[in-house]
Image: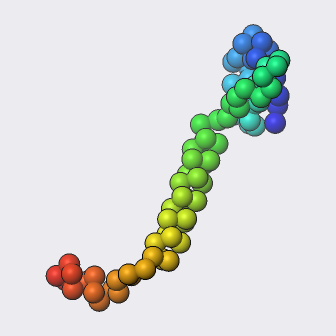
Amino acid sequence: MTSVTLSQFRSQQSDYIAAAQREPVEITSRGAGRRAVVVSPEFYDRAVRALEDQTDMHAAVEARSEVGRVSHEELMHELGL
C-alpha cells in the first residue's frame, strides 16, 4: 500500500488516483495519523459485496438457530401451496 501525506495527495491527486487503481493509497496527516484510504471502484465493490455476504451468512446462522422453526410442509400448507 502506498502511503502519502495529505499535502502530497493534494498536489498530485491525479497521480495518486491512478495509483489507487493498482493498490490502495493511504492518506496521512500530521497529528491525525491515517485519514483516508483511496481504492479503485472495483476494490470498493468487492469489499462491499464481501461485507454483505458476511452479514447474510450471520443472518442465516441466526435464523437456523431460532426457536419455533416451521417445516417445509407447514410453510407450504400456510401458503396454500
| Closer-to-camera residue (7/68) | 68
Q: Specify the quadrant that holds the C terminus.
A: bottom left
| Closer-to-camera residue (46/54) | 54
The number of discs equals: 0
As drawn, 34 above or below 8: below
Q: Residue furthest front?
A: 67
Residue 39 quadrant:
top right
Residue 33: image location, x then y, percent: 80, 26
Residue 71: image location, x then y, percent: 35, 87
In the image: residue 21, left or right of residue 76: right
In the image: residue 21, left or right of residue 49: right
Residue 23: image location, x then y, percent: 75, 37
Q: Residue furthest left?
A: 80
| Closer-to-camera residue (26/64) | 64
Q: Is residue 20 visible?
A: no
Q: Residue furthest top?
A: 11
As drawn, 15 above or below 81: above
Q: Specify the quadrant that holds the N terminus.
A: top right
In the image: residue 32, left or right of residue 74: right
Specify the color scheme.
rainbow
Q: Residue at x 25, y 83 (%)?
A: 76
As drawn, 34 above or below 81: above
Residue 4 quadrant:
top right
Q: Residue at x 60, y 54 (%)?
A: 50
Q: Residue at x 34, y 83 (%)?
A: 70
Residue 49: image location, x then y, percent: 55, 52
In the image: residue 55, left or right of residue 29: left
Q: Residue at x 54, y 58 (%)?
A: 55
